[in-house]
C-alpha cells in the first residue's frame, strides 16, 4: 500500500500542471467556503438589524413608526466608522478597481487582513441595507485566498496571478 501511495505522490508532483490543477481545486474549495461564511455573516447581520432593530425601535405597520426605518442603515454606517478609522482606505468604497490594479500592476500580493476586512465591512454594509453587491467582494475574497495560497507556496508573481484567478 505504501509503495502505491509513494508512486502516486511521485506521479502527481512530477508534473507541474497536475500540481497547479490540484492547487487550483484546493483554492476553489477554500474560496467557496469563505464566500459561504461571508454570505452567512450578511444574513446574520440583516436579521439582527432588521428584525431585532425594528423591535427595539418599535417600528411597526403604522406610518408614523415607519419613519424610523432609515435609521437602520445609519446604524450600519456607524458600525463601519471604527473599521474605517483603524484601516483607512481599506474599508469604504468600491474595492474591485483597487483589487484589479493590485493584481495587474503590483504583482497580486493580497494580505489576509484585506480578505477579512472585505468580508466584515461588506457584510455590515449589505446586512444593514447599504448599497452594495456581493459579486465584487466575493471576487476579492476568492482572489485574496488564491493570492494567500500562492504566497504561502512561494510562487512567482506570474503564477500568483494564475492562482488569484482560480479563487474568483
Image (cartoon, rainbow, N blue to C red):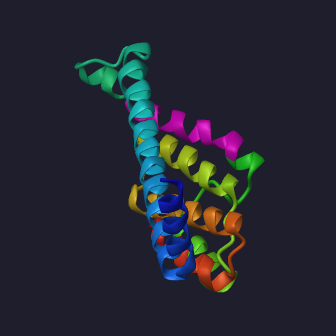
Secondary structure, magenta segment, majority class: helix
Residue at (43% x, 25% y) in the render: 48
- The verdict on residue 80 being magenta is yes
Residue 67 visible in rendering: yes
134 or 162: nearer the viewer: 162
**Which quadrant would residue 134 be assigned to in this image?**
bottom left
In the image, residue 46 sits, relative to residue 150, either above or below, namely above
Residue 128 visible in rendering: no
Magenta residue span: 69-83
Residue at (60% x, 37% y) in the render: 78
- Percent position of residue 6, x then y: 55, 63
Residue at (57% x, 53% y) in the render: 118
Residue farthest along the left direction in this orientation: 61
In the image, residue 125 sits, relative to residue 67, either above or below, namely below
- Percent position of residue 146, x then y: 56, 65
Q: In which quarter of the image is the C terminus?
A: bottom left
Residue at (45% x, 73% y) in the render: 21
- Percent position of residue 71, x then y: 46, 32
* 55 sits to left or right of 156: left
* 129 sits to left or right of 8: left
Residue farthest along the right direction in this orientation: 86
- The verdict on residue 156 being magenta is no
Amino acid at each position: 500500500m505504501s509503495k502505491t501511495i509513494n508512486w502516486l505522490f511521485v506521479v502527481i508532483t512530477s508534473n507541474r500542471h497536475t500540481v497547479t490543477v490540484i492547487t487550483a481545486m484546493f483554492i476553489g474549495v477554500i474560496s467557496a467556503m469563505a464566500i459561504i461564511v461571508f454570505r452567512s455573516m450578511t444574513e446574520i447581520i440583516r436579521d439582527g438589524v432588521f428584525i431585532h432593530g425594528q423591535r427595539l425601535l418599535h417600528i411597526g405597520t403604522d406610518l408614523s413608526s415607519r419613519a424610523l426605518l432609515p435609521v437602520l442603515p445609519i446604524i450600519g454606517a456607524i458600525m463601519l466608522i471604527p473599521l474605517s478609522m483603524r484601516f483607512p482606505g481599506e474599508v469604504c468604497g468600491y474595492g474591485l478597481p483597487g483589487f484589479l490594479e493590485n493584481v495587474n500592476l503590483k504583482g497580486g500580493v493580497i494580505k489576509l487582513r484585506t480578505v477579512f476586512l472585505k468580508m466584515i465591512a461588506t457584510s455590515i454594509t449589505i446586512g444593514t441595507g447599504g448599497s452594495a453587491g456581493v459579486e465584487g467582494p466575493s471576487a476579492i475574497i476568492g482572489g485574496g485566498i488564491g493570492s494567500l495560497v500562492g504566497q504561502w507556496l512561494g510562487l512567482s508573481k506570474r503564477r500568483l496571478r494564475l492562482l488569484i484567478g482560480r479563487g474568483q
